[in-house]
């Protein structure tokens, strides 16, 4: 899926869902071709751009970010794609994973 956003002076694209994973598994995976887990800010920005482009997400569940939930070390941030809201969840739960990579222009 080619959804791009300019975030902190760089352009990123968002992958299709790669499945359900625990947070620790997703961040430990060595993804190919420059793909990686997005930060909470990157994921929220890409979600916003997709909605502006009237993209409909088939997967409306929580999507992991690489960002830890500081108040509780057992948690990490997700973006709930049904409404674009961020929330924290226990890292041992399985949630959707989408990746980002920088787009070279």
Image (spheres, rainbow, N blue to C red):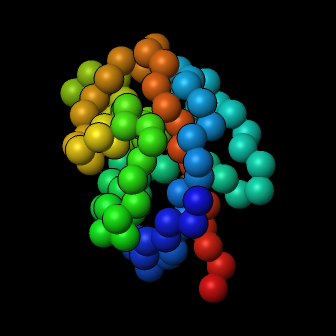
Q: Where does residue 35 sit, x and y in percent of width and height?
A: 66, 53
Tell me the quarter of the picture where residue 65 sits. top left
82 or 29: nearer the viewer: 82
Residue located farthest toward the right when viewing the structure as drawn: 32
Q: In percent of the image, x 43 and y 20: which residue is there?
A: 91
Q: Residue at x 43, y 75 (%)?
A: 6
Check the image and report above or below for 50 versus 93.
below
Q: Quadrant of residue 33?
A: bottom right
Q: Is residue 13 above or below residue 59?
A: below
- The residue closer to the viewer here, 39 or 54, is 54
Q: Quadrant of residue 69?
A: top left
Pick out the residue farthest to the bottom.
105
Locate the C terminus by quadrant: bottom right
Image point 36% across, 18% down: which residue? 90
Q: Residue furthest top?
A: 92
Tell me what residue is drawn at x 60 percent, y 30 percent. Answer: 19
Using residue 38 as the reference point, say whether residue 33 is left or right of it: right
The answer to whether residue 102 of the structure is visible from this angle is yes
Q: Position of residue 94 (x, y in %)?
A: 48, 19
Location of residue 47 in the rendering, given as x and y in whole percent from the top left corner: 36, 56
Q: How many marks?
A: 0
The quarter of the image holding the N terminus is bottom right
Above or below, 32 against 3 in this view is above
Q: Is residue 32 left or right of residue 96?
A: right
């Amino acid at each position: 899926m080619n959804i791009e956003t300019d975030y902190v002076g760089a352009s990123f694209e968002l992958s299709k869902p790669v499945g359900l994973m625990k947070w620790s598994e997703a961040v430990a995976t060595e993804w190919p071709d420059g793909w990686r887990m997005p930060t909470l800010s990157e994921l929220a920005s890409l979600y916003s751009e997709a909605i502006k482009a009237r993209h409909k997400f088939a997967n409306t569940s929580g999507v992991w970010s690489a960002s830890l939930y500081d108040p509780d070390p057992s948690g990490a941030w997700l973006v709930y794609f049904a409404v674009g809201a961020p929330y924290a969840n226990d890292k041992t739960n399985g949630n959707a994973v989408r990746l980002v990579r920088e787009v070279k222009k």
